[in-house]
């Protein structure tokens, strides 16, 4: 729909669900998660005007029928799509080929790719911290928030979003952060300058204005 709410158009039909929609950088394609069964979710894409529905991800060989969840798609440079599988970040091309595992954490709750495509901010439930890691592996980690329970006592999953210039991030949870009466934080990408945005209450899925 238009930004003013007009010209609403339905893009998916029937049983085709459309969770976690993500626009491609050129605005022509939308990637999203479709729940095929309670146990199997896959990444699909379609044209922004409707039509052209494609299944992007399929279960790895040897996966039990209905036993794999692919979710939270996001676009990377060169037309690749990132997503969570088995609580790690993977990437594929828009046709579903070239599957690559980008992290080896095994317990990531959420992630966000930096605007330059070089870094991943991850909600690392294994170490109970929010970290920035190189998107292609190797290199140092930057810890933004640790330990998470000190800031998010009830909800370990924190949603992340980078500023358009890649210099800072917003972090939010549906659980109230500490005693601040707010669930939205801002932090520099080098880990400095952690600050709460006061009196926001519960916040989900922050997004920066370009």
Image (cartoon, helix red, strand yellow):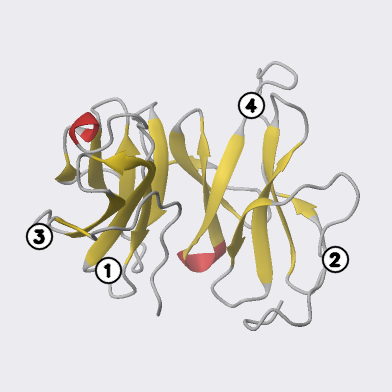
- Quarter of the image where one finds residue 143: top left
Separation of marks 1 and 3 at Cα, in angstroms: 15 Å
Give the mark nearest the N terminus, 4 or 2. 2
Expressed as whole percent of the image width and height from the top left, the position of residue 74 reads 52, 56
Of tags 4 and 3, which is closer to the observer? 3
Count of numbered tags: 4
What residue do we see at 81% from left, 72% from top?
A: 9
SS of the residue at dot 4?
loop
User: Can you tell which mark lies on residue 193?
Assistant: 3
Frontmost residue, 80 versus 29? 29
Separation of marks 4 and 3 at Cα, in angstroms: 39 Å
Res 56 visible: yes
Of tags 1 and 3, which is closer to the observer? 3
SS of the residue at dot 3?
loop
Give the mark nearest the N terminus, 4 or 1. 4
Residue that mark 4 sits on = 68
User: Can you tell which mark lies on residue 166?
Assistant: 1
Expressed as whole percent of the image width and height from the top left, the position of residue 210 reads 40, 80
Circle 1 crowding by C-alpha within 10 Å: few under 14, some 14–19, many from 20: some
Q: Using residue 47 as the reference point, say whether residue 126 is left or right of it.
A: left
């Amino acid at each position: 729909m238009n930004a003013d709410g007009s010209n609403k158009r339905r893009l998916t039909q029937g049983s085709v669900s459309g969770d976690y929609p993500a626009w491609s950088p050129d605005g022509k394609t939308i990637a999203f998660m479709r729940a095929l069964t309670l146990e199997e979710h896959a990444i699909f894409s379609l044209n922004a005007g409707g039509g052209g529905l494609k299944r992007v991800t399929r279960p790895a060989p040897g996966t039990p029928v209905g036993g794999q969840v692919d979710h939270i798609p996001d676009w990377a440079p060169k037309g690749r799509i990132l997503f969570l599988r088995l609580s790690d970040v993977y990437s594929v091309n828009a046709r579903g080929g070239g599957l690559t595992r980008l992290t080896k954490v095994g317990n990531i709750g959420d992630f966000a790719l930096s605007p330059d495509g070089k870094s991943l901010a991850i909600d690392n439930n294994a170490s109970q911290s929010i970290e920035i890691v190189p998107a292609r592996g190797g290199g140092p980690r930057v810890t933004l928030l640790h330990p998470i329970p000190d800031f998010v006592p009830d909800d370990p999953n924190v949603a992340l979003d980078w500023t358009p210039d890649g210099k800072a991030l917003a972090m939010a949870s549906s659980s109230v952060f500490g005693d601040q009466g707010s669930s939205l934080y801002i932090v520099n990408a080098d880990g400095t300058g952690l600050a709460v945005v006061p009196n926001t209450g519960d916040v989900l899925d922050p997004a920066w204005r370009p």
